[in-house]
């Protein structure tokens, strides 16, 4: 996996798919073989400074955090929402699934780290 992060864009590449997010407050899932946008997810909140995205270990779930502290979890195959969390009071800055995707850790500029799961 290749990970590139800047102030405005973050890319997480898992061949043959790429996911990107940026100042447009959207997450786009791409098929790199066909250079085709498979799906676009509009995120709640505004601003790009808090945007972060990650896949679980298997690539089945995608979590995206926004500038207002909300986190959206999507099932990638069906591209259906699994959960929407009001996780933090400030920008979400990091996300990590555990190995079997039964828990999600989030961190924020509100100086908290939270663990979500069953």
Image (cartoon, rainbow, N blue to C red):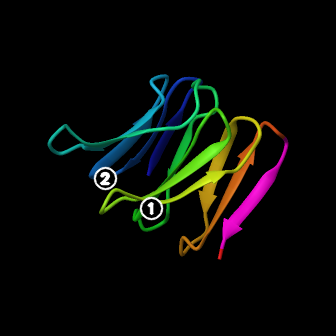
Q: Is 30 left, or right, of 106 in this rendering?
A: left
Could you tell me which secondary element the residue under label 2 belongs to? loop
Q: Is residue 113 magenta?
A: yes
Pointer 2 residue: 15
Q: Is 62 left, or right, of 92 in this rendering?
A: left
At x 68%, y 40%, the residue is: 69
Q: Is residue 116 magenta?
A: yes
Q: Position of residue 115 (x, y in %)?
A: 73, 63
- In the image, residue 117 sits, relative to residue 48, either above or below, namely below
Q: Earlier in the sequence, mark 1 or mark 2?
A: 2
**Residue 6, picture quadrant:** top right
Q: Is 15 left, or right, of 56 in this rendering?
A: left
Q: Is 45 left, or right, of 113 in this rendering?
A: left
Name the quarter where the C terminus is drawn: bottom right
Q: Nearer the viewer, mark 1 or mark 2?
A: 1
Pointer 1 residue: 61
**Residue 47, picture quadrant:** top right
At x 70%, y 35%, the residue is: 91
At x 50%, y 62%, the residue is: 56
- In the image, residue 21 sits, relative to residue 2, either above or below, namely above
Region rendered in magenta = 111-117
At x 30%, y 62%, the residue is: 78
Could you tell me which secondary element the residue under label 1 belongs to? strand
**Mark 1 Cα shell of 10 Å, populated few (<14), some (14-19), many (≥20):** many
**Residue 60, picture quadrant:** bottom left
Most distant residue in the right direction: 111
Q: Position of residue 94 (x, y in %)?
A: 66, 46
Instruction: Give the Cα distance between marks 1 and 2.
Output: 15 Å
**Numbered circle sitting on residue 17:** none
């Amino acid at each position: 996996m290749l990970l590139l992060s800047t102030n405005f864009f973050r890319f997480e590449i898992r061949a043959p798919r790429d996911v990107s997010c940026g100042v447009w407050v959207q997450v786009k899932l791409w098929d790199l073989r066909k250079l085709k946008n498979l799906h676009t997810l509009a995120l709640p909140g505004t601003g790009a400074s808090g945007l972060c995205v990650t896949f679980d270990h298997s690539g089945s779930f995608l979590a995206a955090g926004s500038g207002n502290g909300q986190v959206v979890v999507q099932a990638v195959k069906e591209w259906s929402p699994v959960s929407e969390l009001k996780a933090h009071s400030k920008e979400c800055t990091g996300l990590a699934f555990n190995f079997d995707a039964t828990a999600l850790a989030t961190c924020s500029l509100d100086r908290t780290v939270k663990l979500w799961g069953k």
